[in-house]
Amino acid sequence: MRRKVWYAAFAGAVGTLISNPFDTVLTRIQGDYLLPKEQQRGYSGLGDGMGKILNKEGFKGLMLGVVPNMLRSAAFNIGALAYFD
Protein backbone atom coordinates (compact mmCIF):
# COMPACT_ATOMS: atom_id res chain seq x y z
CA MET A 1 0.00 0.00 0.00
CA ARG A 2 2.85 2.39 0.78
CA ARG A 3 4.11 2.05 -2.79
CA LYS A 4 0.68 2.92 -4.18
CA VAL A 5 0.61 6.09 -2.08
CA TRP A 6 3.94 7.21 -3.53
CA TYR A 7 2.80 6.38 -7.06
CA ALA A 8 -0.41 8.36 -6.56
CA ALA A 9 1.49 11.36 -5.21
CA PHE A 10 4.05 11.16 -8.02
CA ALA A 11 1.36 10.92 -10.70
CA GLY A 12 -0.41 13.99 -9.35
CA ALA A 13 2.80 15.99 -9.13
CA VAL A 14 4.00 15.07 -12.62
CA GLY A 15 0.60 15.74 -14.16
CA THR A 16 0.56 19.18 -12.62
CA LEU A 17 4.13 19.89 -13.69
CA ILE A 18 3.16 19.17 -17.30
CA SER A 19 -0.16 21.03 -17.28
CA ASN A 20 0.84 24.09 -15.24
CA PRO A 21 1.91 26.29 -18.20
CA PHE A 22 -1.46 25.72 -19.88
CA ASP A 23 -3.28 26.44 -16.63
CA THR A 24 -1.33 29.67 -16.17
CA VAL A 25 -2.31 30.92 -19.63
CA LEU A 26 -5.94 29.86 -19.17
CA THR A 27 -6.14 31.65 -15.82
CA ARG A 28 -4.74 34.85 -17.32
CA ILE A 29 -7.07 34.70 -20.31
CA GLN A 30 -10.12 34.20 -18.09
CA GLY A 31 -9.17 36.96 -15.65
CA ASP A 32 -8.01 39.49 -18.24
CA TYR A 33 -11.36 41.26 -18.48
CA LEU A 34 -11.26 42.06 -14.75
CA LEU A 35 -8.20 44.27 -15.19
CA PRO A 36 -8.45 47.93 -16.22
CA LYS A 37 -8.23 48.41 -19.99
CA GLU A 38 -4.66 49.73 -19.85
CA GLN A 39 -3.45 46.67 -17.91
CA GLN A 40 -5.20 43.98 -19.97
CA ARG A 41 -2.84 41.61 -21.73
CA GLY A 42 -5.08 40.93 -24.72
CA TYR A 43 -4.16 37.29 -25.31
CA SER A 44 -5.97 35.95 -28.36
CA GLY A 45 -5.53 32.30 -27.43
CA LEU A 46 -3.28 29.65 -25.93
CA GLY A 47 -0.40 30.02 -28.39
CA ASP A 48 -0.45 33.81 -28.23
CA GLY A 49 -0.57 33.75 -24.44
CA MET A 50 2.32 31.31 -24.14
CA GLY A 51 4.39 33.29 -26.60
CA LYS A 52 3.79 36.60 -24.83
CA ILE A 53 4.51 35.15 -21.39
CA LEU A 54 7.71 33.48 -22.64
CA ASN A 55 8.90 36.71 -24.29
CA LYS A 56 8.08 38.96 -21.34
CA GLU A 57 8.65 36.75 -18.27
CA GLY A 58 10.54 33.72 -19.56
CA PHE A 59 9.84 30.10 -18.66
CA LYS A 60 9.48 31.05 -14.98
CA GLY A 61 6.39 33.04 -15.89
CA LEU A 62 4.70 29.91 -17.20
CA MET A 63 5.61 27.95 -14.09
CA LEU A 64 4.27 30.40 -11.51
CA GLY A 65 2.58 28.56 -8.66
CA VAL A 66 3.73 25.12 -9.75
CA VAL A 67 4.95 23.94 -6.34
CA PRO A 68 1.69 24.59 -4.42
CA ASN A 69 -0.26 23.07 -7.31
CA MET A 70 1.95 19.97 -7.31
CA LEU A 71 1.46 19.53 -3.56
CA ARG A 72 -2.30 19.96 -3.94
CA SER A 73 -2.50 17.42 -6.75
CA ALA A 74 -0.34 14.92 -4.87
CA ALA A 75 -2.55 15.23 -1.79
CA PHE A 76 -5.71 14.94 -3.88
CA ASN A 77 -4.46 11.77 -5.57
CA ILE A 78 -3.57 10.21 -2.22
CA GLY A 79 -7.05 11.04 -0.95
CA ALA A 80 -8.63 9.56 -4.06
CA LEU A 81 -6.53 6.42 -3.64
CA ALA A 82 -7.65 6.07 -0.04
CA TYR A 83 -11.29 6.50 -1.02
CA PHE A 84 -11.42 4.36 -4.15
CA ASP A 85 -8.87 1.64 -3.41
Image (tube, rainbow, N blue to C red):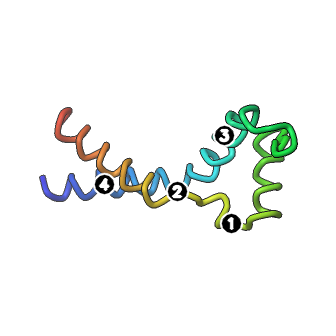
Which one is in front in this view, the residue at disc 2 or the one at disc 4? 2
The reply, left or right, for residue 7 in relation to residue 42 is left
Which one is in front in this view, the residue at disc 1 or the one at disc 4? 1
Q: Position of residue 6 (x, y in %)?
A: 25, 58
Q: Earlier in the sequence, mark 3 or mark 2?
A: 3
Q: Earlier in the sequence, mark 1 or mark 3?
A: 3
Disc 1 element: helix
Residue identified by numbered label 4: 9
Which amino acid type is shown beneath numbered disc 4? Ala
Disc 2 element: loop
Residue identified by numbered label 2: 65
Q: Earlier in the sequence, mark 1 or mark 2?
A: 1
Disc 3 element: helix
Q: Residues within 10 Å of mark 3 (few under 14, many from 20)?
A: some
Which amino acid type is shown beneath numbered disc 3? Leu
Q: Residues within 10 Å of mark 2 (few under 14, many from 20)?
A: few
Disc 4 element: helix
| Mark carried by residue 59 | 1
Name the residue at 73% across, 67% down: 58
As drawn, the residue found furthest toward the left would be: 1
Quadrant housing residue 14: bottom left
Quadrant housing residue 18: bottom right
Which one is in front in this view, the residue at disc 1 or the one at disc 2? 2
